Image: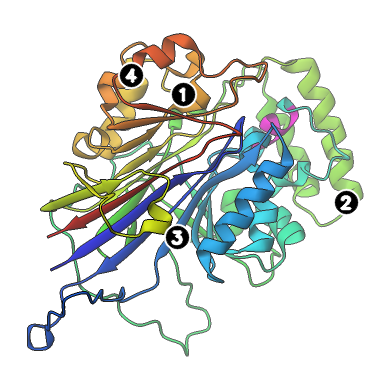
């Protein structure tokens, strides 16, 4: 018997987002060694694959700190396999550096945007040349090296998803990956393809850090039975009627140099140009959507969402239900119209897009990132609103909540988190 156990967890961070989970896989044992012993639970062949999606809050720093401590206990000294940063707003990234220092990550995945667009996002948040965080928008890899040190192994940039998505796999593949060639020091492990740093608007002198690129139509496989598929909406690049991109080009060398004085001078010049050109109206809605789910059809489906599951283990809290164990994480993604959903659905393939067990409602349930009927189109089993209702933003908005009312809405705020445990077999 082949088994998957998946956990999807949302930490109580208030107005922000911090989701995490794990995948455990038990392949079928060789027939000649199969021995059934009552009461014995076989250990997984490999350590659990652990993932995190965003890590931030604008409600209180302590909420993120407490959640990181909780996750560190779950990880048992192991690094996170995949840390995804959906976008660059503070309530989604304020705890990322602390997470990398405390636990670490093998791969940090984030959406790629050209240098001029990254600068717009940074300026749009009120950052100035002297702010240390501005380096994240100039060169995110250099910023993570500077702030997190050895807390990560590689950075994976997801290119705009303007092509066909991955083919839909009807059957899981259990073939083991070939062993790494330990003698080949230039071989880069992990997902994605190698790419010259200059092609991604980054500096060339990041030492031995590995920078990789995930092209459209590529997925991240896990144990051959699970897949993560990121979606970087190609329509999020803002219009540039005043030629801001052309103004950034002459400053490119100074921005991507290691000379702080030259970089800050270039940033001050471009900040002034930004204020004169865009004011505070620049639309920068980049947000990486992440789908995660089992490959193929699974016979047995059980799930649990009780708060005592962590202590009860696999007892009477399990419930039988037809679930695919999949999750859709949207960050602050823009799903404000039918065309937006259709583009995402077409990229993922409808058979993935409409079979999610857990759906994180975009932008904390903001009406600007939603359209009436999104709940019916996505048709999740459970919808999660990660927000602080007492915040001035007033998320979730009432009309969005009403739309998802029949999709078992769950409120995750500074007082309450949510976790779902799922078990699949074939």
- SS at circle 3: strand
Which is more foreground, mark 1 or mark 4? 4
Magenta segment includes 155: no
| Label drawn at residue 21 | none
- Per the model, the C-alpha gap separating discs 1 and 4 is 11 Å
Camera-side mark, 3 or 1: 3
Q: Residues within 10 Å of mark 2 (few under 14, many from 20)?
A: some
The residue identified by callout 2 is 260
The quarter holding residue 4 reads bottom left
Please report whichever mark, 3 or 4, sits nearer to the chain's N-terminal start: 3
Instruction: Name the residue at 48% across, 72% down.
Output: 188
Q: CA distance from mark 3 to mark 4?
A: 29 Å
In the image: residue 154, left or right of residue 145: left
Q: Secondary structure at mark 2?
A: helix
Q: Nearer the viewer, mark 3 or mark 4?
A: 3
From the viewer's perspective, tell me whether residue 319 is left or right of residue 203: left
Which percent across, then down, holds residue 84? 51, 49
Main secondary-structure element of the magenta-colored stretch: helix
Q: Residue 334: which numbered mark, if any?
A: 1
**Eyeballing the image, is 22 above or below 415?**
below
Question: Please, is residue 163 above or below residue 68 in the view?
Answer: above
Q: Is residue 202 visible?
A: no
Q: Which residue is mark 4?
A: 374
Q: Furthest-left residue in view?
A: 31
In the image, what residue occupies the spot 69% across and 65% down?
206
Quadrant where the image shows the C terminus = bottom left
Comes first in the chain, label 2 or label 3 = 3
Q: Earlier in the sequence, mark 2 or mark 1?
A: 2
- Distance, label 2 to label 4, CA atoms, is 46 Å
Looking at the rendered image, the disc whose residue lies closer to the viewer, 2 or 1, is: 1
Magenta residues span 118-123
The residue wearing badge 3 is: 50
């Amino acid at each position: 018997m082949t088994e998957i156990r998946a956990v999807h967890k949302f930490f109580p961070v208030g107005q922000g987002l911090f989701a995490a989970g794990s995948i455990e896989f038990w392949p079928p044992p060789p027939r000649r060694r199969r021995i059934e012993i009552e009461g014995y639970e076989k250990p997984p062949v490999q350590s659990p694959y652990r993932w995190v999606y965003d890590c931030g809050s604008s409600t209180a720093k302590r909420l993120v700190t407490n959640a990181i401590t909780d996750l560190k206990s779950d990880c048992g000294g192991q690094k996170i396999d995949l840390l995804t940063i959906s976008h660059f707003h503070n309530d989604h990234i304020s705890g990322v550096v602390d997470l990398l220092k405390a636990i670490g990550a093998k791969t940090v995945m984030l959406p790629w945007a050209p240098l001029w667009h990254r600068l717009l996002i940074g300026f749009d948040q009120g950052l100035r040349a002297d702010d240390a965080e501005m380096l994240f928008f100039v060169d995110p890899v250099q910023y993570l090296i500077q702030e997190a040190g050895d807390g990560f192994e590689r950075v994976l940039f997801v290119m705009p998803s303007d092509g066909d998505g991955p083919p839909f796999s009807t059957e899981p593949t259990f073939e083991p990956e070939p062993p790494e060639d330990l003698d080949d020091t230039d071989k880069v492990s992990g997902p994605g393809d190698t790419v010259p740093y200059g092609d991604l608007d980054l500096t060339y002198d990041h030492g031995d850090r590995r920078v990789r690129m995930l092209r459209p139509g590529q997925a991240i496989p896990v144990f051959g039975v699970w897949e993560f598929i990121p979606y970087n909406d190609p329509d999020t690049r803002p219009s540039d009627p005043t030629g801001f991109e052309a103004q950034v080009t002459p400053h490119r060398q100074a921005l991507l140099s290691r000379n702080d004085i030259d970089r800050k001078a270039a940033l001050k010049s471009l900040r002034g140009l930004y204020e004169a050109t865009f004011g505070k109206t620049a639309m920068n809605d980049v947000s990486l959507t992440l789908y995660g789910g089992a490959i193929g059809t699974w016979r047995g489906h059980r799930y649990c969402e009780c708060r005592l599951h962590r202590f009860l283990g696999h007892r009477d809290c399990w419930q039988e239900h037809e679930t695919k164990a999949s999750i859709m994480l949207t960050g602050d993604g823009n799903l404000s119209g039918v065309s937006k959903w259709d583009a995402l659905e077409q990229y993922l393939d409808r058979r993935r897009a409409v079979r999610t067990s857990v759906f994180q409602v975009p932008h904390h349930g903001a009406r600007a990132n939603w359209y009436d009927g999104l709940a019916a189109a996505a048709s999740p089993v459970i919808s999660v609103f990660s927000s602080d209702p007492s915040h001035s933003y007033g998320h979730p908005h009432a009309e969005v909540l009403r739309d998802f009312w029949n999709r078992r809405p769950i409120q995750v705020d500074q007082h309450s988190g949510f976790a779902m445990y799922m078990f699949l077999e074939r």
